[in-house]
Image (tube, rainbow, N blue to C red):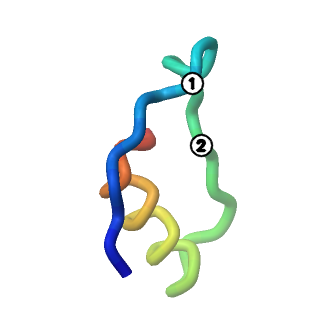
């Protein structure tokens, strides 16, 4: 699956994604979201 960078929507420049749980799935989601530019 190819990921493409897209501009951040207005008003979401400081949006932070929070994850609960760091099992294998949580870790995978955290890595993918981080690679996509989310913090």
Q: Is residue 35 left or right of residue 25?
A: left
Quadrant location, the C terminus:
top left
Label 2: few (<14), some (14–19) or many (≥20) C-alpha neighbours in 10 Å:
few
Q: Residue at x 58, y 27 (%)?
A: 15
Q: Nearer the viewer, residue 18 or 2?
A: 2
Location of residue 26 (image quadrant): bottom right
Q: Secondary structure at mark 1?
A: loop
Location of residue 17 (image quadrant): top right
Read off the residue under disc 1.
9
Q: Residue furthest right?
A: 20
Q: Nearer the viewer, residue 10 or 38?
A: 10
Q: Residue at x 50, y 18 (%)?
A: 13
Which label's residue is closer to the chain start, 1 or 2?
1
Which x, y percent locates residue 37?
Answer: 35, 44
Q: Secondary structure at mark 2?
A: loop
Read off the residue under disc 2.
17
């Amino acid at each position: 699956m190819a990921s493409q960078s897209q501009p951040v929507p207005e008003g979401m420049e400081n949006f932070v994604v929070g994850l609960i749980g760091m099992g294998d799935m949580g870790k995978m989601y955290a890595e993918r979201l981080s690679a996509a530019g989310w913090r």
